[in-house]
């Protein structure tokens, strides 16, 4: 066990914030901790980081993450969904191995390097479902989307060991250098990073994971807007490309020179980057690269930035916690052409607003995106519902208290907040779909399809399906849905996740956790579900919440669901659970079960 006092303190904080079981070995908790640190710094906007952890069937790699356009994907279908809304794709692979020891083991380092190399050579590197899923996704990307890639994929390999630097690290560096050469020989990657991470570097990664976006720019060509209700300061002007790139880019923690676009600052932007080949972006790029690119300032609609903190001293503007709420297409196009624009005279129209008022932020997001393909009523629905959900969650008293993370990393800097009780949008959508939409298979294997229904509710079905069938696809957010619908789903997810963490439910059932949520609802409530808009939904769902928040009854309920899954003989794997038929099989068993017993969940 590591004797590094700071690492031990940070790990303890991480364990407490995530309510990890005290019986969980530090070595296991450390794997989750490292995975969180690495992926948080990557500024991944959506995804369950814990899904990246490999199971015990793999000895050389602790976690594998595949990001497509900044989104953590979990299946081929997820990749298809991202590709459906983006003409250009960027792909990133992240491999980690974490050792929480005081002794350096060169053999462990070699296991990691050989496993990563073997992953791409289809070598036998263990019996891990996560490895198999990721290999399947890798093949799918190469075989189907090679032509859409902006560049060949990037790969980052982190070997983390908390032992202080010593002569032994020289051998570790040699192993990583050999991995670098092996990966280069594959000719698969645009860039390759192999790195040893020690205790001080890991500390920095953890601290960076909790920081919101910060930047300082020179904004001289501007005018100050008059006082506006709910707005602390507001400016309109033009910003040189060089200054804009300061806002857009972020130095990676492991690279002194390389910069990437900050994907986290586009969380409030409704639409993803549509790719360089989209008609609008293609025209924009031609303007930027033409001999008259100085005209860009009068031809472009500009970028709208909302920031929570703004310190102005002369022409120096220090922003903290900022979001680009409109202008993703402009931002990405400029970033993609940055090498030829740094010394140019190109300026970009900018609207900069400082406000803490959530209603003002919502109004700005809606107004500035109203001219896109996204309908204004969809924008309003999302904004109104999410605000209501946030307020509803915050109003619940302990021990039934949860928080809804409407904005990425909203609570990360608040160390007094129990992170396990923070439900992000990605988790909420999956929980809601599994619990009340009878779509646990989508929550399991096709979460990006669910996420697309936030803004694109009718695009869920295949193109060859009828319009009438498409209209039956239920949107995720509607402004007249009762907030308790989401709270009930989130509560069930939280309690089930806690049962897994404490070992009260066998972790081998975790691939079926979304099916367990669906079964739990059917166990505790009548099959006839009121409309989510019905004011009586609160009363209808109340017995379910009573069971969920009662420790003994919730344990009994989820044990029942586990027994049903065991009885079904369904394979406990993500691939099996993303089959829509899995729920039907389980519901038939449930009907027999209910007919022969009163069940332990109902009172």
Image (cartoon, helix red, strand yellow):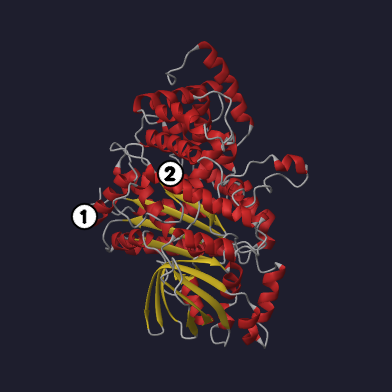
* The C terminus lies in quadrant: top left
Residue at image position (65%, 60%) is 86
**Front residue of 84 and 68:** 84
Given residues 496 and 206, the one toward you in this image is: 496
* Residue 267 picture location, percent across and down: 51, 60
**Would residue 519 be seen by someone viewing this image from the given angle?**
yes
Q: Is residue 350 left or right of residue 230?
A: right
Numbered label attached to residue 360: none
Picture residue at 36% right of the left edge, 41% below the top: 401
Question: Does residue 42 sit above or below 510 in this rendering?
Answer: below
User: Taking 589 as reference, is 290 above or below it?
Assistant: below
Q: Which residue does the numbered mark 1 point to in the structure image? A: 5
From the top left corner, tell me how far across and down residue 317 is, in percent: 40, 78
Kind of element beneath mark 1: helix
Looking at the picture, does residue 562 appear above or below residue 286? above
Taking 333 as reference, is 52 left or right?
Answer: left
Q: Earlier in the sequence, mark 2 or mark 1?
A: 1
Q: Residues within 10 Å of mark 2 (few under 14, many from 20)?
A: some
Q: Secondary structure at mark 2?
A: helix
Cα separation, mark 2 vs mark 1, equals 40 Å
The reply to whether callout 2 and callout 1 are in contact (CB within 8 Å) is no
> Residue tagged by mark 2?
392
Q: Position of residue 226 (x, y in %)?
A: 46, 77
**235, 337: nearer the viewer:** 235
């Amino acid at each position: 066990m590591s004797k590094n006092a700071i690492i031990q303190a940070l790990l303890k904080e991480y364990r407490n914030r995530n309510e990890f079981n005290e019986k969980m070995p530090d070595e296991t908790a450390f794997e989750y901790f490292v995975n969180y640190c690495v992926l948080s710094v990557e500024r991944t906007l959506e995804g369950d980081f814990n899904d990246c952890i490999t199971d015990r069937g793999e000895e050389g790699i602790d976690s594998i993450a595949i990001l497509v356009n900044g989104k953590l994907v979990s299946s081929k279908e997820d990749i298809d969904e991202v590709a459906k809304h983006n003409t250009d794709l960027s792909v990133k692979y992240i491999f980690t191995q974490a050792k929480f020891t005081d002794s350096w083991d060169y053999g462990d380092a070699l296991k990691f390097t050989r496993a990563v190399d073997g992953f791409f050579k289809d070598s036998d590197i263990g019996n891990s479902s996560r490895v198999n899923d990721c290999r399947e996704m890798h093949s799918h990307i190469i075989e189907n989307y090679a032509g859409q890639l902006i560049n060949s994929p990037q790969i980052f390999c982190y070997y983390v060991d908390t032992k202080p630097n010593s002569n032994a690290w020289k051998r570790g560096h040699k192993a990583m250098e050999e991995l670098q050469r092996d990966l280069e020989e594959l000719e698969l990657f645009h860039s390759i990073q192999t790195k040893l991470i020690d205790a001080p570097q890991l500390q920095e990664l953890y601290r960076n994971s909790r920081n919101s976006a910060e930047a300082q720019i020179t904004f001289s060509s501007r005018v100050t807007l008059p006082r506006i209700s709910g707005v602390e300061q507001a400016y309109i002007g033009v910003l040189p490309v060089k200054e804009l790139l300061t806002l857009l880019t972020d130095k990676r923690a492991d690279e002194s020179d390389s910069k990437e676009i900050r994907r986290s600052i586009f969380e409030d932007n409704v639409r993803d980057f549509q790719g360089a080949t989209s008609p609008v972006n293609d025209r924009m790029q031609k303007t930027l690269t033409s001999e008259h690119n100085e005209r860009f300032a009068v031809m472009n609609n500009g970028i709208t930035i909302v920031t929570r903190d703004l310190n102005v001293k002369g022409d120096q503007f220090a922003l903290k916690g900022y979001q680009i709420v409109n202008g993703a297409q402009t931002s990405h196009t400029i970033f993609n052409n940055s090498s030829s624009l740094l010394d140019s005279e190109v300026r970009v129209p900018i609207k900069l607003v400082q406000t803490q008022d959530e209603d003002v932020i919502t109004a700005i997001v809606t107004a500035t995106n109203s001219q896109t393909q996204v309908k204004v009523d969809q924008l309003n629905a999302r904004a109104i519902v999410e605000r209501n959900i946030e307020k509803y969650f915050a109003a619940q008293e302990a021990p039934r208290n949860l928080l809804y993370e409407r904005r990425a990393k909203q609570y990360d800097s608040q160390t007094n907040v129990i992170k396990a009780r923070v439900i992000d949008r990605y988790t909420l959508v999956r929980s809601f779909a599994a619990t009340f939409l009878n779509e646990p298979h989508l929550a399991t294997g096709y979460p990006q399809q669910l996420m697309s229904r936030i803004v694109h509710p009718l695009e869920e079905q295949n193109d060859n399906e009828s319009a009438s069938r498409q209209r039956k696809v239920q949107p995720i957010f509607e402004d007249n849905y009762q907030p308790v619908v989401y709270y009930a789903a989130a509560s069930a997810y939280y309690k089930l996740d806690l049962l897994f963490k404490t070992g009260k439910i066998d972790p081998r059932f975790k691939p079926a956790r979304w099916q367990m949520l669906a079964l739990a609802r059917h166990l505790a409530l009548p099959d006839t579900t009121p409309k989510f808009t019905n004011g009586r939904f609160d009363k209808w769902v109340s017995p379910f919440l009573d069971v969920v928040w009662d420790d003994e009854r919730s344990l009994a309920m989820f044990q029942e669901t586990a027994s049903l899954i065991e009885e079904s003989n369904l394979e406990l794997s993500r691939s099996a659970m993303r089959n829509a038929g899995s729920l039907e099989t389980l519901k038939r068993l449930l009907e027999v079960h209910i007919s022969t017993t009163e069940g332990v969940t109902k009172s």
